[in-house]
Amino acid sequence: MDWAEKYRPVRLADIVGNASAVQQVARWARDWTHKSKPLLIYGKPGIGKTSCATALANDMGWEVTELNASDQRTAAVIERIAGGGSTTASLTGAARKLIVLDEADNLQGTADRGGARAIVECIRSARQPMILIANDLYGIAPEIRLRCEPVQFKALPARSIAPHLKYICAAEKVECTDAAVRQIAESAEGDIRSSVNMLYAAAIGRQRLDDTHVHTSQKDERISIFSLISAMGSKTSDEDLLRLSREVEDTPETIEQWIEGNIHLLVGDASLQGAYHYLARADEYLGYTYRRQYHMLWRYANAVMLLGVADMAAGKGVHSRIMPPARWHKMAGAKKQKAIRSALLNKIAGMMQVPQNTLREEYLGIISQLVENDPAGFTRALSMDAESLNFFLNDKVRSSEIVKKVALEIREEEKQKEKESKAKKIPPAEPPVPEEQPPEAQKNSEKKPPSEHQATLF
């Protein structure tokens, strides 16, 4: 058995890192009622999301029903497996049944057609706890996100992964140096499953590991690129700069973007024009590379931008925090907005029975005006969250307030419906039927005068 499976967490106390998220999951399970929202656990792969769900079930004594992306997740399959499981009790005698839908952000294509709608119906009718697991929060349909309680799992720092690797080495009686453990932990880039797999691969057939035995398949690109940018600002020789550029697992185009994003930290105002001149010249070489498919020109692009900008920096050093290129942040925001827009247009196009292109080109302005006039009604009808509504209103504060108000109204309506359904189930109390008295007793009661202390209505 490989070590990733052998040392998989069994209890919540075994989960490495993400302590606040694990506490939120445990608190949700402890306070769960049939009115509780499902959990939506999201984060990058290999950081313990699925392990947390199974460990929670072990701690609570719950049975687990799991449906993942390897299954054909049509609406019928989800309704049969997750939907039926969410409304029926456990057959094994467990206190509850935990429904786990893994990789919930991969509901796409014809195989998963109708899957999102089936999940919404499962959530509405669920009488058992449900956990949805995803890598990308915004890869999940808004109508599902609105009905879930999000829990974010973050990538683990190397200092959290290293003690776990040492524990595994001690359990397997493998002597491992601190340098080897540190190298594996840093190369994993926050993925604890990947770090355990790398340790397992390096330890096969050995009783002792050092850094010469560890051949990781990945490098910590962030540290390498940071070292390269820092070296450009210091008095580093030309040979060392070019050597560092070859060690970075990035293309010259990406290196150019990092330099451009941090050029204000390297070069003063007086030399800024010269630094941009060298960047522009390197960009020409990159253009020649892609047009002519002659990748030997990459070395000229690297030499021009690295040595030229370093010459303009004059070895003054970098005294501020090196940040990723600002354009990456803008691109991520644009990608997120595009995903929101695509999901909204897809939903509205399906309701109106028109193609998405026609809707976007001819009706989007009209729909935006309608949403502006009645945002609460459209929020309810389209199951929009604050970010989806903000696509039409372009006002984050107002969108958030409207979505909260609509969610509160929906909860109040559900409570009222639940009260009405309970009232219908309880029959009205009938007055007790008096027992028949013998004729003699009836005569005596008729002749008996009223008591002096007897209260009268009139």
Image: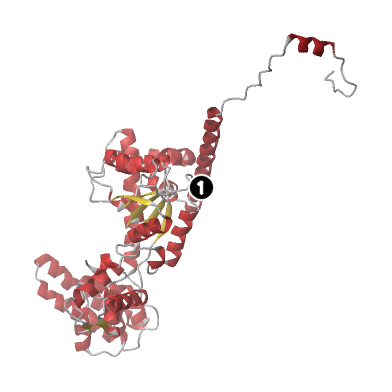
Q: Nearer the viewer, residue 123 or 361?
A: 123
Closer-to-camera residue (101/139): 101
Can you give x and y, in whole percent of width and height, for residue 282 in the image? 20, 75
Question: Do we see residue 275 in this rendering?
Answer: no
Q: Quadrant of the C terminus?
A: top right
Quadrant in which residue 165 is drawn: bottom left
Above or below for 313 versus 93? below
Residue 19 x/y as whole percent? 43, 67
- Of the 4 image quadrants, the one containing the N terminus is bottom left
Q: Residue at x 41, y 39 (%)?
A: 125
Looking at the rendered structure, the kind of residue marked 1 is: Lys
Badge 1 crowding class, 10 Å Cα cut-off, few under 14, some 14 to 19, many 20 or more, is some
Left or right placement of residue 113 versus residue 89 in this view: left
At x 40%, y 49%, the residue is 94
Q: Which residue is mark 1?
A: 404
The quarter of the picture where residue 45 lies is: bottom left
- Residue at 22% x, 43% y: name it: 111
> How many discs appear?
1
SS class of the residue under badge 1?
helix
Q: Nearer the viewer, residue 287 or 194?
A: 194
Q: Is residue 202 above or below residue 241?
A: above
Question: Could you tell whether 183 is left or right of 437 in the image?
Answer: left
The image shows residue 124 at horizontal and vertical percentages of 42, 40
Residue 416 position, x and y percent, is: 55, 35
The image shows residue 174, relative to residue 135, as above or below, that is below
Q: Residue at x 49, y 47 (%)?
A: 33
Of residues 229 and 166, the one nearer the viewer is 166
Residue 58 visible in the picture = yes
